[in-house]
Image (cartoon, rainbow, N blue to C red):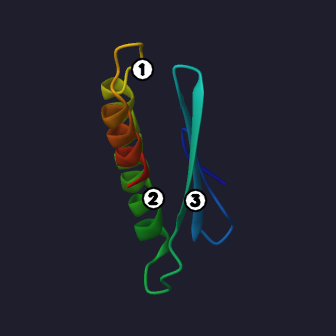
Amino acid sequence: MKIDTGLKACKNYEKFLFRFKIKNKSYRKTFDYPNKSWDKRTRISKARIDAFNYKKKIKSVHINSSLNEYTKLDEFIHNGSQLLL
């Protein structure tokens, strides 16, 4: 089920898939909310918030990590580790 641009959900709205591109590089993330006490609307709004925050985080790392011949290895590793957190 399509929720928003790049955000899709399974039938019971417990798992969400978020896909987007930045400068021809694709990114993908799944969000899983098996908490049964949440209703459908709460899970959808939580997925939208988490998707927005994930995309914002990727954009900030992408802007800060311009790789060229002058990039130090320590800076490159630090920027890459920020992406995984």
Residue 27: which quarter of the image? top right
Q: Which residue matches tag 3?
A: 16
The x and y percentages for residue 67 are 42, 20
The x and y percentages for residue 6 are 57, 40
Q: Tell me which amino acid carries mark 3.
A: Phe
Q: Secondary structure at mark 3?
A: strand
Q: Which residue matches tag 1?
A: 67
Check if mark 3's residue and mark 2's residue have beta carbons within 8 Å. yes
Picture residue at 34% right of the left edge, 46% below the top: 82
Q: Tell me which amino acid carries mark 2.
A: Ala
Query: Which circle, 1 or 3, is nearer the viewer?
Result: 1
Residue 78: which quarter of the image? top left
Q: Earlier in the sequence, mark 1 or mark 2?
A: 2
**Crowding near the residue tagged with mark 2, few <14, some 14–19, many ≥20 C-alpha atoms within 10 Å:** many
Q: Tell me which amino acid carries mark 1.
A: Leu
Residue at mark 1 to residue at mark 3: CA–CA distance: 32 Å
Q: Secondary structure at mark 1?
A: loop
Q: Earlier in the sequence, mark 3 or mark 2?
A: 3
Picture residue at 38% right of the left edge, 20% below the top: 66
The x and y percentages for residue 69 are 41, 13
Question: Residue 80 bears which disc, if any?
Answer: none
Q: Which residue matches tag 2?
A: 47
Q: Nearer the viewer, residue 8 or 22?
A: 22
Residue at mark 3 to residue at mark 2: CA–CA distance: 7 Å
Picture residue at 58% right of the left edge, 27% below the top: 25
Q: Residue extending furthest bottom?
A: 37
